[in-house]
Image (tube, rainbow, N blue to C red):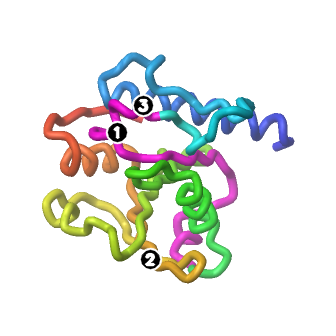
């Protein structure tokens, strides 16, 4: 795919993710937006803007990737791991008080979510409270240890409900 086509695919994916998050949170689609990186006077944090008043229910800085060529098996390798490179971008973009996540997909695959946090501050007991299917991946970036949890989007929404929200929302991809 040429650069124009890949940018278009990435933009379409960002719009889809913004719509899904808005539906999940029960807010109008205009509330959850793609960031506009061309604004030179604004510091950009991630690909999707979560307004501050919603961060108690959805405390994430989001990086989106719609990229072909990856496999789930490749994410289990520590060498040349694309998921770890994406996680590093999400960590760098993170807003204070939020968790870094990467939402990604490729053609004919569901949307996946990779939740990333430093090992010493990761709330692992939240997984004991609300166990759901996921995969744990540990890795290092710049001599810091991180833990990531890999979910499908619907299971991530279930996880978020168990940790941050009491009401259950069902959003289909």
The secondary structure type at the circle numbered 3 is: loop
Mark 1 in CB contact with mark 3 (< 8 angstroms): yes
Reply above or below: 138 against 155.
below
In the picture, the disc for residue 51 is: 3
The secondary structure type at the circle numbered 1 is: loop
Name the residue at 66% across, 30% down: 36
Q: Position of residue 169 (x, y in %)?
A: 24, 33
Region of the chain picked out in magenta, as a range: 50-77
Q: Position of residue 57 (x, y in %)?
A: 28, 39
Q: Is residue 91 left or right of residue 98?
A: right
Mark 2, other Cα within 10 Å: few <14 / some 14–19 / many ≥20 = some
Label 3, label 2: how many angstroms apart (C-alpha)?
30 Å
Q: Quadrant of residue 161?
A: top left
Q: Is residue 70 left or right of residue 31?
A: right
- Tell me the mark number nearer the camera, choosing from 1 and 2: 1
- Tell me the mark number nearer the camera, choosing from 3 and 2: 3
Q: Is residue 11 magenta?
A: no
Q: Is residue 67 left or right of residue 130?
A: right
Name the residue at 26% across, 65% down: 123
Q: Quadrant of residue 164?
A: top left
Reply above or below: 33 against 146.
above
Q: Earlier in the sequence, mark 1 or mark 2?
A: 1
Quadrant the N terminus occupies: top right
Name the residue at 45% across, 73% down: 146
Q: Earlier in the sequence, mark 3 or mark 2?
A: 3
Which residue is denoted by mark 1 in the rendering?
A: 55
Which residue is denoted by mark 2 in the rendering?
A: 138
């Amino acid at each position: 795919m040429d650069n124009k086509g890949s940018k278009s695919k990435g933009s379409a994916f960002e719009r889809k993710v913004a719509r899904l998050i808005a539906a999940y949170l029960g807010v109008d689609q205009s509330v959850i937006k793609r960031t506009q990186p061309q604004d030179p006077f604004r510091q950009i944090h991630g690909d999707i803007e979560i307004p501050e008043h919603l961060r108690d229910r959805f405390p994430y800085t989001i990086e989106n990737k719609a990229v072909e060529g990856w496999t789930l098996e490749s994410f289990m390798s520590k060498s040349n791991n694309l998921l770890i490179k994406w996680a590093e971008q999400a960590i760098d973009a993170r807003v204070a008080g939020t968790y870094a996540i990467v939402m990604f997909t490729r053609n004919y695959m569901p949307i996946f979510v990779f939740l990333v946090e430093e090992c010493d501050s990761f709330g692992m007991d939240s997984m004991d409270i609300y166990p759901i299917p996921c995969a744990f991946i540990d890795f290092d970036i710049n001599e810091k240890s991180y833990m990531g949890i890999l979910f499908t989007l619907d299971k991530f929404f279930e996880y978020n409900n168990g940790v941050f929200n009491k009401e259950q929302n069902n959003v289909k991809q």
